[in-house]
Image: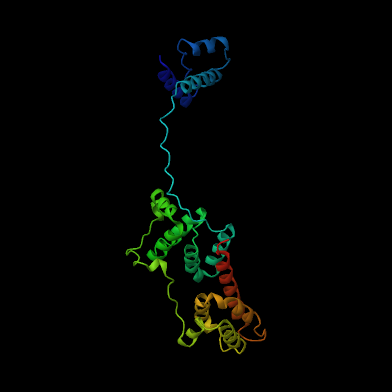
Amino acid sequence: MNIEAYWREMVTVALLGTDRRDPPSPPEGGLADLAADDPQPTASQRLLQQVAGCTVVRRAGLQPAPPAPMVAPPAADPRPITPAAATGTWRRIVADWPVLEDEWLLAMVQRGRRLAPELVPPLLARHRTDAVRHARVLLAAGPLGQWMIDWSPRLACSASKPAPPGAAEQLPELAIVPELVPLLAAPPAEAARALAAGLSSAQFGSAHRAVLVNLLARISPASLPAVGQAVNRVDPSSPSIGLAFALSDLTHLRHHMLTELEPA
């Protein structure tokens, strides 16, 4: 009896139980010597002894499989990765103010940075149904983005139409009422004064939240410090104080994210 046949016999005995069938006699050689040198008092102990010995013999005969091919790394990307703190900023943006995410990605690309590797899969997955935003993520990720998609096709874009040429490199337009459009490029002090006055007088209320959020997401970055300070000084007794707090948070977060991505 060879080792393979002996092993199959022992498996059969183990399945049936030693109270129904005695273990087979070991084949001549080392296994028979083991049984003779260390006799066991019960059938189950004899079976376990032979299983252990047979396992050693079987494993000793194994040969290593051919080595797996090395995974080719992505092409080199000389751009520095985003600061470690920017990962936390992105998580706050998507949780609190996702309106800022497009600018965060473009600011990174324009400042010659690339996505930290740990952010590439979640961002590709997050925007896989949006062709423009998915393409924007690939711009920020560099060669690592396509490399990730090659290894995990579920990260590929699933939109039915490709992104229009150049769309990924431009900020999407946001709806802003005509009377607020001049504030986009107004001098910082003028923009800050107008927003603070409108909030203090309750001219701006909850109905204006969406357009004011869009305004502060696209207002000139130079105006952000002045606007943030002015909104912080809104009269606490104003009915719009809650809106002022929210806009202040948006303004300070946008200023922080743009400053954080500046080259060292």
Which residue is at the front of the view, 149 or 115? 115
Looking at the image, residue 130 sits to the left or right of residue 202; the answer is left
- The percent coordinates of residue 113 (x first, y second) are 50, 59
Query: What residue is rendered at 52% in x and 10% in y?
Result: 33
Between residue 121 and residue 116, name the one nearer to us. Answer: 116
Quadrant of res 239: bottom right
Where, quadrant-wise, is the C terminus in this rendering? bottom right
Q: Is residue 117 above or below residue 216?
A: above
Q: Is residue 183 above or below residue 84?
A: below
Is 176 or 53 nearer to us in this picture? 176
In-image side of 165 versus 213 (left or right): left
Q: How is the image coloured?
A: rainbow
Q: Position of residue 8 (x, y in %)?
A: 42, 22
Q: Position of residue 188 (x, y in %)?
A: 57, 81
Residue 189 occupies which quadrant of the picture? bottom right
Q: Nearer the viewer, residue 99 or 9?
A: 99
Q: Name, please, the residue furthest toward the left.
A: 161
Residue at the image position 49 percent from the left and 76 percent from the top: 218
Percent x, y for residue 165?
34, 66
Which quadrant is home to the N terminus?
A: top left
How many numbered discs sit on the rendered protein?
0
